[in-house]
């Protein structure tokens, strides 16, 4: 069965650079979520989108922005990268109408390292 | 405010032992969902179970079982006859049904190490 696809798997950037992470949800899933997991930490919610509109926002820095496109894939844009942005970034998707919290499936994550 | 507490940071057992991972949650909502995820060394988050607040029936799936008790706000996870492949970090998570977008609040995770 198709899963949530994230690209790239690994990304190395330098301070003050920009990075774009991509997420392709499971087919027919209309909701996408982004989470950030620092080393040894639990995943922290950043932002979510339903039908291409932002549906909820968590502890996402102003330097980050995200959007969901017409094909439901999502991109997380990160600018002016800082050392503290080094983390594993997860995307998750779900389908509405089955109970909004019915099943939330995560991608394998993008490991971002800022040097 | 929502909060999930996994008091056990690390647990180490020997293969074939049973082990219980504790999870305590806080929420003001009467409708909510509880989850367990497994994060193996490879890093992905693997969905294990979802339980809604109206269903207190315990669940068993193979060697895994879950004990949901609203009276103590706990949702504990037991692995019977543990195996080396069970070694991972396990996260308990909470989502309030009224919260659009399925935001999950995770506990700090419990790192389980199963030794041969």
Image (cartoon, coloured by chain):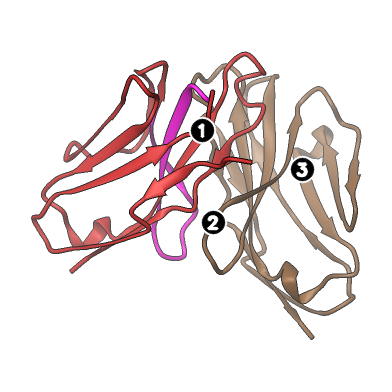
Screen quadrant of the C terminus of chain B: bottom right
> Are the residues under badges 1 and 2 in a single subunit?
no
Classed neighbour count for the residue bearing mark 1: other residues with Cα under 10 Å, few (<14), some (14–19), many (≥20): many
Q: CA distance from mark 1 to mark 3?
A: 26 Å
Based on the displayed image, in which of its 4 quarters is residue B38 positioned? bottom right
- Residue A29 versus residue B108: which sits nearer the camera? A29
- The first of marks 3 and 2 along the sequence is 2
Mark 3 element type:
strand
Residue A12, x across and y down, in percent: 23, 64
Q: Could you tell me which residue is drawn at 41 percent across and 16 percent down?
A: A51
Q: Is residue B63 above or below residue B111?
A: above
Q: Which residue is mark 1?
A: A93
Q: Could you tell me which residue is drawn at 59 percent across and 35 percent down?
A: A104
Stretch in magenta: A29-48
Q: CA distance from mark 1 to mark 2?
A: 14 Å
Q: Chain B shown in which color?
A: brown
Q: Which residue is mark 3?
A: B74
Residue A67, x across and y down, in percent: 28, 27
Q: Is residue B2 above or below residue A95?
A: below
Q: Is residue B36 above or below residue B101?
A: below
Q: CA distance from mark 3 to mark 2?
A: 25 Å
Q: Say if mark 1 contacts mark 2, CB within 8 Å.
A: no
Q: Which residue is mark 2?
A: B44
């Amino acid at each position: 069965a198709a899963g949530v696809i994230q690209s790239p798997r690994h990304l190395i950037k330098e301070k003050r650079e920009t990075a774009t992470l991509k997420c392709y949800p499971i087919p027919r899933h209309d909701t996408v979520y982004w989470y950030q997991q620092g080393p040894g930490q639990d995943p922290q919610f950043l932002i979510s989108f339903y039908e291409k509109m932002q549906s909820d926002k968590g502890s996402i820095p102003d330097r980050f922005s995200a959007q969901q496109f017409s094909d439901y894939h999502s991109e997380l844009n990160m600018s002016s990268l800082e050392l503290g942005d080094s983390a594993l970034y997860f995307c998750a998707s779900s389908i509405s109408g089955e109970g909004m919290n019915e099943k939330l499936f995560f991608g394998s994550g993008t490991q971002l390292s800022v040097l | 405010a929502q909060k999930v507490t996994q008091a056990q940071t690390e647990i180490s057992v020997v293969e074939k032992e049973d082990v219980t991972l504790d999870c305590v949650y806080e929420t003001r909502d009467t409708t909510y969902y509880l989850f367990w995820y497994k994060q193996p060394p490879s890093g992905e988050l693997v969905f294990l179970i979802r339980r809604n607040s109206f269903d207190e029936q315990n669940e068993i799936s193979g060697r895994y079982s879950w004990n949901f008790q609203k009276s103590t706000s706990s949702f504990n996870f037991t692995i019977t006859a543990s195996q080396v492949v069970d070694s991972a970090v396990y996260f308990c998570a909470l989502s309030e049904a009224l919260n659009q977008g399925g935001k999950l609040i995770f506990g700090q995770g419990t790192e389980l190490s199963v030794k041969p």
